Each structure stands twice: as structure tokens, then as C-alpha cells.
Amino acid sequence: MSRPAALLLPLLTALFGSACATMSNATAARAIARDPHSHAEPERVRVKHVALDLTLDFGARRAEGTARLELERRDAAAPLVLDAVALDITAVMGSSGGARRFKVGEADPTRGSRLEIELSPRDTAVIVHYRTTEGAQAMQWLEPEQTAGGKQPFLFTQGQSILTRSWIPLQDSPGVRVTYEATIRAPAGLVAVMSAEQLGRGADGAWRFGMSEPIPPYLIALACGELEFRAISSRTGVWAEPSVVGLAREELDDTERMVQHAEALFGPYRWGRYDLIVLPPSFPFGGMENPRLTFATPTILAGDRSLVGLVAHELAHSWSGNLVTNATWRDFWLNEGFTVYFEQRIMERVFGAERSAMEKVLARRDLELELAELAPWQQVLHCDLAGHHPDDGFSAVPYEKGALFLRRIEQLVGRDEFDRFLRGWFDGHAFESVTTEEFLVSLDRELLARHPEAAAQLDLQAWLYAPGLPSDAPRTQSTLLAAVDREVERWNGQTKASELDTHGWVTQQWLRFLDALPDELHVTQLAELDRTFRFTQSGNSEILCAWLVICAHNRYTAADKATAEFLLRVGRRKFLKPLYAELAKTPGGLRRAKEIYLMARPRYHAVATRTLDELLSWGNVR
Ligand code: BES
Ligand code: ZN
């Protein structure tokens, strides 16, 4: 039995009590890996494989069919316990023949229902017959007018964090990895794609898929619409609607290079193909790292490849997140913090240190602004989510504070040593779901034990368990952003906008420019900026959104039309939230926000409406 290293003993003792002194670190770390966001009891009966056979009915907006679940039965007497939200379960059959009794528990507001299925002694699988309902939060069914083509409807799913249970009955915990296969029956003229290997179409026209690596359920994903494919390299490519796919192919040209750089950093890409799908604009996220097929918003298509850091990010998840997965949503920073760190390393290699430095400075600024708004518990990296929806822990903290923590370790032990450790971490935990405690045990054993001088300077307690940002968080300098700050100073000192030296500025510099402007601006100043730099007409979604927030704050009505148009077209939560929040600060703005929201809400995904309903007190008094 290994003894906890001296360094970690106080921390682990605080976490697990004195029991850990007599337990191996690994056992202690495993002991608390319970997922409070799932009803499942995988330690008794565990789902190992999911086989779907679903028919998509766009008219009725539902999927209907079966999910066959292959089981590992550790406790022969135990029932199978699944998660389900708003599923209409019509029957459950046992693999050894006959119907099985099942019980759908009362829906709890966060987790949904516990679905308990009685098993016969010889059952090795069950077949659940079901259909989805209007409450399927994971699924967004789009009307043709919400697509680029305007003729065909569109469907996509979004599983993370706990939405997969609203379209598939299963053990919806990131600690319960499954392989999967699927048969998807879609109307003629539509193409179905999934986060899996495409196995072609059967004689019946159905689309077939297989994922032979065990993945967490939140990564099972489906999209269906009028889609075309363009190759980028022999193993990368992009899916999109016909009128978008050409543009998308150009914008994403660096994808293969990114995969090569990522492999050089942290080991082989283990998923075969890396494709992307560019979805219609109502997709609620920038990107979602569904394995083999990243889902992306069309708002990254800026025309100049300036927003492809998002591709580096979603690609990086192929290691941090998909290969080594957070065991519970409490460990979310293990997914996102590692991924932001990794994304920055890829960007540095593909686009150079200066671009990467600008992105780091902007990200840190966003973190600092957000920290000022968050409750103390939300500022903690290893935050306690029990009693909360996983979404309530979503902020820049797991992302940027997580990445800064890793950069701090890198700074202390040196890049070569840290890279060696990370490669070992990904290899040693490939296709596993891990907790923060397991990470700490590895960190101690594989890295800090060899670098006592670094270990002595690293305040793990502060980084992982305290609110705020530790004072040793690494700082990044950017000469290109410093140049922007000087121009803003000149403008503040009465230099005309047209006389500022903005020659050759890239997106990140424009974002800094907008951020560095004084908070309070006069309408004539806004008009001057807009006339000179044409922000309201910007085709770059990041720049446009930042500008529209400034306009809302300063009640620059000339941008009202553009704001309404943007909010009606785009469903990306990252943009909607700050814009609606800014509008909601004044009574007049709130009225406008609600008028727009009334029209736009049916076009947003449930992920976005959950956030915005709360922000606008929707459903209370309108
Ligand atoms: N996995 C996340 C998206 C996510 C997180 C969905 C939590 C549901 C719950 C994805 O990798 C992500 O972080 N996307 C970012 C882009 C990125 C460049 C920071 C986004 O969507 O903005
Ligand atoms: Zn991410």
C-alpha cells in the first residue's frame, strides 16, 4: 500500500478525513466519486453499451424507437436504475424474453426522473421502447426558416451537461462510459450525422453509426438536415448546409495542422477522423466537442480565420474531456481548464506566440470581470455543486482559472517536465473518468514529488478550494494589445478616431479596443466610432456583440435595429446573455429586451432559454 506523499497528506486528510492515512491515495480519491446529478446506481448494475434505433418525425418534433442497453450486473438482485427526463416510455423488454416492470419516479427539477427497471436473473440487456416529448431539452428542432437554405427543417442534439437523458434513457453520468451504435431513420433529402463512425446507409435508407470507444453519455450527439461534406485533409473535414459549406471549408483550413500540432504535444489522436459540423445559428454554444464530430456555431465564420481558436479548443477536448473525462460535474475544470491550457499551446504553435498572448490577456480580463460578479462558491475551481444544476457552475472559472493553475505549475517545473507529466496523464487515464482528487494524487506522485522546490511554492489549497484568483497567477504581456491601449489613450485625449493608427489590427486588437473604451460614452462619440470603424456592420460576431453591448449600455439607438436582428438570428448563449443583461439594466431597455425575447425565444435552444428566462424573470410578471 502506498503512503500519501507528505505534501498532499494535509489536503487529502482535509478532504477525506483521517481515513486516508490508512488508505492508498487512489482508493481515497475513488471513494467520493458519487455523481449527485444522476439517479443511476452503476456500482450495482451498469450500462456498458447503447444501441439506438430511432425514427425522426420532424412534423411531430419527436424521435421514436428503441434503446437497447447492454448491462454489467454486479449485484444480481439489484434493479437497473436509469435517468430520464420527459421521455414517454411505452414498454421495456428483457433480453431473456418478455416484458419487464418499470417505474418512472417523480421528476426532480434538476436531475429529472429515476427510471427503475426490474430485471430477470438471466437478462444481460433491456430494450426500452420510447418516444421523446416536447420536454426533450437536448433536442432542438428548427423550422426551415431557421436554416441557411430555408427549405428543409433541421435537428441537432446537445447533451452536455445532463441533457442526454431527455432523448435517451440511460445512466447519464460522465463516470458511466458507454460504447454505442445507432440506426437513424430520417426523411428523404436529409442527412444524419453523429459523434461516431459513419457506417453508411442500409438498404432501407436508414443511417448507421458506431462508436467503439467508451465515451461519457453527454458526448452522444446527432444532427440531421440538408448537409454536405467537404474534405480538409484525409482525416479532417466539415459538414454544413450547401450554401455554407464552401465558406466553412475555407475558414477551417487550419484544422489538419492543428491536429498535427496537438499530436506532437500530447500524443496520438485516438478517434480516427476529426470532422466538424457548422450548425445553424441557433446552436447555443460556440462549439461542442462531440467525438469525431465537433459541433460548431456559424458565428466562428468571420472570413479571416480569426476565431478558429474555437477549433483548437474543441479539438483539444479529444484529449482533455473525451479521452480523460471529468468523473462528475464538480470536476468540470478538469475538462475545461486543461482544454483551455491545451488550446493555448496549439494556438501558439499554429499562429505564433503573439496571437496566443493576446488571447490569453483577453481571457484573463474576462475572468477578472466575471469573478467580480460571481458568488464565492462559484469562484472555487473544485466547486461544490451538490444541490445545484451543473450549469450554475458554468463560468470563466473552470476555464480560465483552471488554465492559469496549469500554467502556474508549468512555470514552476518548466515546460518540458510539465509536458512529460501531461502526456503521462492522458496515456495513463485514457478512456477513463477521473476526479480532482485522482488528479492531485497523480500530480503529487508523478510531478511534484520530483520537484520539491516547486511543490513548496504551489499553494494547492488556494488554487483549488479558495475563491478569487491566487496572487501567483501567471501574467501575460502583449505588445500588440499595449499598442491598442495607446491608441485608446489618444482618442480619450481628443484625437479623432480617423487619425488613430489602427492599421493592420486583427480581431483580438479590436476586441481590446472596445474593452478599453471608457464605460460611459456620449452618443456623438459612439457615432464617430461607428462612422469610422463600421462596428454595427461588422461581420465578426465577437466584435459585433461587444459593440452592441456598449451601444446598449450607452443607449445608442442607431444600433437598435442591428441588436434586434442579432438577437433574433443568433442563439449562442455567450452572446445573448451579456446583451440581454445590458438591456435589462434600464426600464426602457428591459421592455425592448422582452419584446425581442418574446419573438426570439421559440428559436432558442433550451440551454439558452434556461439562462435567459432567469435573467429576464420570464414566466413571472411580464
Ligand atoms: N464543452 C464546452 C461547451 C459546454 C460546456 C456545453 C458546458 C455544455 C456545458 C465547449 O468545449 C466549450 O467550452 N465551448 C466554448 C468555446 C470555447 C472556445 C471556450 C463555447 O461554446 O463558447
Ligand atoms: Zn470546452
Image: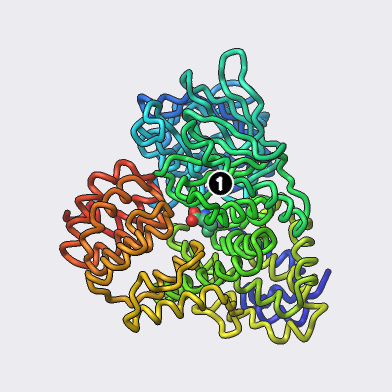
User: How far across and how far down the image is residue 243, in percent?
Assistant: 46, 33
Q: Nearer the viewer, residue 134 or 552?
A: 552
Q: Is residue 513 visible?
A: yes
Residue placed at 58% from the left, 38% from the top?
238
Q: Is residue 378 visible?
A: no
Residue placed at 38% from the left, 58% from the top?
544
Please state, as top left, top right, bottom left or bottom right, where the C terminus lies in the image: bottom left
The part of the image, by quadrant, that contains residue 292 is top right
Is label 1's Cβ within 8 Å of ligand 1? Answer: no
Residue placed at 75% from the left, 61% from the top?
425
Question: Which residue is denoted by mark 1 in the rendering?
Answer: 251
Q: Nearer the viewer, residue 82 or 461?
A: 461
User: How far across and how far down the image is residue 592, in percent?
Assistant: 19, 56
User: How far across and how far down the image is residue 66, in percent?
Assistant: 53, 26
Please, is residue 258 above or below residue 58 in the view? Answer: below
Q: Report the residue that reaches farthest toward the top.
A: 203
Lateral position of residue 49 relative to residue 132, left or right: right
Please, is residue 240 above or below residue 617 in the view? Answer: above
Secondary element under disc 1, as helix, strand or loop, is helix
Q: Report the residue that reaches farthest toward the front.
A: 499
Please state, as top left, top right, bottom left or bottom right, where the N terminus lies in the image: bottom right
Residue placed at 69% from the left, 70% from the top?
440
Lateral position of residue 277 relative to residue 113, left or right: right
Lateral position of residue 525 relative to residue 498, left or right: left
Q: Amino acid at mark 1?
A: Glu
Q: Nearer the viewer, residue 236 or 254?
A: 254
Badge 1 crowding class, 10 Å Cα cut-off, few under 14, some 14 to 19, many 20 or more, is some
Coloring scheme of the render? Answer: rainbow
User: How far across and how far down the image is residue 86, in percent?
Assistant: 40, 38
Q: Nearer the viewer, residue 278 or 80?
A: 278
The part of the image, by quadrant, that contains residue 590 is bottom left
